[in-house]
Every structure is written in C-alpha cells, then in structure tokens.
Image: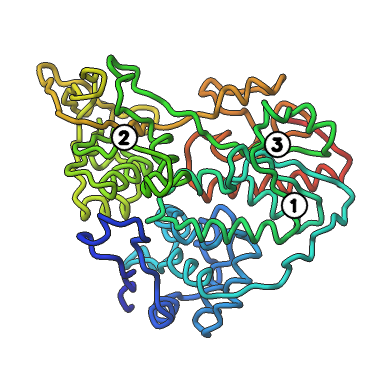
Amino acid sequence: MSPRVKMPKQPPEVRRRNFSEVALGYSSEDALREADRCLGCKKPGCVEGCPVGVEIPQFIDALRRGDADEALRIIKRRNSLPGICGRVCPQEEQCESRCVLSKNDEPVAIGRLERYAADFGHDDRGFGENTKSTRGKSIAIVGSGPAGLTCAADLALMGYEVTIFEALHEAGGVLTYGIPEFRLPKSIVKRGVDYVRSLGVRIELDSVVGRTVKVQDLLRRYDAIFLGIGAGAPRFLNVPGENLGGIYSANEYLTRINLMKAYMFPDFDTPIKRGRKVAVVGGGNVAMDAARSALRLGADEVHIVYRRSEAEMPARLEEIENAREEGVIFDFLTNPVGFKGDGMVRAMECIRMELGEPDASGRRRPVEKKGSEFSMEIDTAIIAIGTIPNPLVLRSVPGLRTTRWGTVDVDERGRTSIEGVWAGGDIATGSATVISAMGAGKRAAYDIDSWLRDGRDWRP
C-alpha cells in the first residue's frame, strides 16, 4: 500500500507570524493519489464512525474518477458543511479510526479528501428551491453554530419554513467566534452559512433569545424549536488574583480576535493586549488556538500550562504538533494556584503535579506534589479550561430541565423536558466537537419531522 499523502503546510517560521490558513490543502494530483488508497469496502467501518453518516466510499470513488462535483453532491446528502468538517473535525478519532487500513497502515485521509471536494467541487442543485415551505409548518432554531445550521438545513430540505435566531452580529456561532482564521478561514464559514440561506432559511441576527426574544413567544409562533446555543460561558480557575488585568477567558480572547478582528487593530477598533510572555491554562483545542493566536500577535514566549501529562491532553495531535512546531512551550504536570500583580498580572503561582489513579473520565487524576511551588513571570494569562451553557439563557426558559453539569437534559432524540423544544450540541453535551454537534442537529431534525408528521407524541 502506498503511503498516505501528506498535506502541504506553511513553514512554521512563516506561519507563526500570520493569520493565513496553515494547511494548504491537496492539489488535484494529491487528491487522486490519496483517493486511490481507498479499498472501497463493502461494509465500510468509516461510515459507522461518522456522526452524520457521510457515504465515504462513494464520494472517494467519485474523486478517484476525477469528479469533485459529484463527490461534493454525495457528501452534501448527509453533511451541509463539508468545507468546515474537512478542516476542524477529529477524523482520526472517528471515521479514519474505523478505516480498515489503520490496522496495519495509515488510514485513508478522509478529512483531507472531504476538504478537497468542498473546496473544488460545485453543487448548484437545490439552491433556492426551498424558499417556500411545502409542509405548512415553521421551525425556530436558536443559535447558528454547527448544530443549528445542520438542523436548519435538514429541515429546510424536508420542506419546512425555518428561521434561525442568532445573538451575535454574524452567523456561524463557535465556527465564527471561536476558531482562528489560520485553522478555519471565515470565508469557508460564510460559504457554509450562505448555503444554508440558499435553502430558504432565514437568519435573524442580533436576536438574543431570553432577552430580545422569549422562548415562550417562539412556542406560540412556531410549531417546534431547536436550541443550539452552544456552551459560551467560560469556566475559571477560581484562584486568588484571577481578576487582575491581562487575564482573559479563552472565549473573550478568541472572540476579540476572530469575530472582532482585534489582530488588525487599529484598522479595526477592537483592542487586545499583545502580551510578551503569555501563559495559556488548559490542554484542549481551544488552548492550542489561544496559544497559537498569541504567537501571531507578537508574543516572545507562549506557554501551555496543563496539569496532566501530554498523554492525557484532549487536543488533537495535529494541533499539538502544529503548536510545538511554531514554538509554543509545553509545561506539563503544572497547575496554577494564583496570580500576582499591581493591577495587571505580573506572575502566575504554580505547583508541580504527579499522576495518581484514573478518575471518572479514565484519565489519571493529577495530585499536587508537596514543596514544588514556583512562580512563572507573565504579563498575559488565558484561561482555557472549558465552557458551560450560558445560565442566563437557560434560566429564561421556565420548565427546562438541566443536569448537574449545567447542560440541558435531553434524550437520545434531542427532546427536552418541554414539549415541542429540542436541544443539541454543546448546550447538551458541554464542549465537544463540531461534527458531534452536527450529528445532534441532524438527529433532532429527523425527530422534529417525525413528531410533526405523526401526531406529536411526546414522551421525553
């Protein structure tokens, strides 16, 4: 079997100082060579590993025949946002992990081929055909992130009238405000949003459900509601000095950079502190995004501070490798216990950790190592230890049952405790992947359709 075709990238010394996309994508020759590696299994495990069930062997076969247009049409039968998924989804844990080649070799680069099809294929079928409802029913979608966009697109294709309510001034949710340009260009997000709009979906921007629009009002105006507001409220360390200047939540930091273009200040009037010595606390993809963004803003030194070892890091291996190539310093088994400064943060107080027995997640629990306290000189700290759904939004929905983790309690179909209201994505699971949120939106769309057609049987 021929080796997996590598994805060309900007050199680390160049890309660490610009916000252009790091991965440059396959050429047509690269895509053909990689597509030729697919065995076309009759019982494809890769499809079972895809949360939205993309017909992977079929689209790869189309690429093998040189037909990117047909490949894109096949993908879009199950996935409305292929250009996004091909860039940010953890295929190595999903479809590619189920590829039969992975048993003895490298799996087919399914995500990279999906990206190629999305970037070079054309799919004009269906655009504008569903501008009017054929079912006589209307659905409200709250949030225009991956779950909301997927649910909206699927329902529009089924013939429903769909309106998305988005709190911010641009659509896309976490795709727009949370993922940096160098990993997911905003032009790709806009293309996905425009495709959903082309199906007849209306998007109402600057509409804060729970404030400017009430869920109870939506229940009176629409036949069903899907909540896909994500998990936008940051978690903090709750340690002394965390309110000093120069300390950001990763949410605020990345939103200022991605949505409000702070990296272009003063051309765009959104300032952000350009730290010289930056510490990013956390070990997930968001932490990698924040650290790599800080480098691009001109930091001399950026540290990832993580309380477990590298083996326990939840970030994608690709993102860890990219960060390391760009010069990010990793401080493993290190836990912040406080911050010091004179109004602005000047130091982060830390303690060394060691790994004990596994916790409920299966990862070994970090335990403080007595007598190992030390101080790290910094001028900027970014806290990237996870998010929760906005409690202000959830409290504005009387009768909505939540879990002890602050997420919305849903069943396997996405039904909430309120009749006619579904939820999915990070609002139900906590911080997770783009494709898992899309899978939740798709499941909810099919269940909403079933409920509206079959007599509204509600057994949450």
- Disc 1 or 3, which lies upstream in sequence? 1
> Looking at the image, which residue is at 59% across and 43% down?
169
Q: CA distance from mark 1 to mark 3?
A: 13 Å
* Element at label 1: helix
**Tag 1: amino acid:** Leu
Q: Are marks 3 and 2 in contact (CB under 8 Å)?
A: no
Q: Quadrant of residue 218?
A: top right
**CA neighbours of label 1 inside 10 A, class few (<14), some (14 to 19), many (20+):** many
Name the mark on residue 155.
1
Residue linked to disc 3:
422
Amino acid type, residue under disc 3 in the picture? Trp
Element class at badge 3: strand
- Give x and y (percent) for residue 353: 19, 26
Q: Residue at x 20, y 31 (%)?
A: 333
Q: Are marks 2 and 1 in contact (CB under 8 Å)?
A: no
Q: Is residue 226 left or right of residue 94?
A: right
The residue beneath circle 2 is 282
For disc 3, the neighbor class at 10 Å (few under 14, some 14 to 19, many from 20) is many
Q: Specify the farthest residue to the top.
A: 240
Q: Earlier in the sequence, mark 3 or mark 2?
A: 2
Residue that lies at the very extreme toward the left in this rendered image: 371
Q: For the point 45% across and 75% down, which residue is it? A: 38
Residue 190 point in image, percent of width and height:
56, 57
